[in-house]
Amino acid sequence: MSCGLDARLPAGIIGLMGSGTVTVSEGGAPAVRVSAAQGEVTVDIVGLPVPVPAASRVLATLSEARGLARELGERGVTLTVCSSGRPVIRLGRLARPRLSRLVTRSGDVEVTDLRELRRLDRRLRAGPAQH
């Protein structure tokens, strides 16, 4: 995710989500689950059938996500990314960064579970073998 161009478009799309859940499956097994309710959007990465090379170096990508996170916060929206149901990253309104503030230089990006984030990073780069 490179938010250097213009974070308003993705933040606007996320902000427009009402409520409900969408599950994307591959081969009968859930891959990604997106749910929204009252200004909170959760993306749960359950299992991906192919590697996602653009996702490498998640921590570097987090510092690039500052613009999106700031825009989400201004719109009163929170985006939480989960790995198999466990929250790993929170962007926007409900983000409460501690040490992640040093990496991202933002009050709108929170790493909720660094160990699980690193596991997710490895899973995204490796593809289905690491699930």
Image (tube, rainbow, N blue to C red):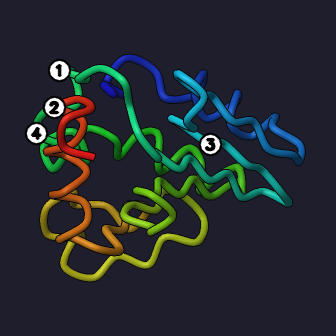
The image shows residue 76 at horizontal and vertical percentages of 71, 58
Viewer-side label of 1, 4: 1
Q: Which residue is mark 2?
A: 125
Secondary structure type for disc 3? strand
Spatial separation of the CA atoms under disc 2 and disc 1? 5 Å
Spatial separation of the CA atoms under disc 2 and disc 4? 9 Å
Question: Residue 92, relative to residue 121: is it above or below?
Answer: below
Identified by mark 2, the residue type is: Arg
Identified by mark 4, the residue type is: Arg
First along the sequence among labels 4 and 3: 3
Do labels 1 and 4 touch, CB within 8 Å? no
Spatial separation of the CA atoms under disc 2 and disc 3? 19 Å
Please tell me which residue lies in front, 27 or 85.
Answer: 27
Spatial separation of the CA atoms under disc 4 and disc 3? 22 Å
Question: Residue 124, relative to residue 53: is it above or below?
Answer: below
Mark 3 surroundings within 10 Å by alpha-carbon count, few (fewer than 14), some (14 through 19), many (20 or more) = some
Q: Which residue is mark 4?
A: 57
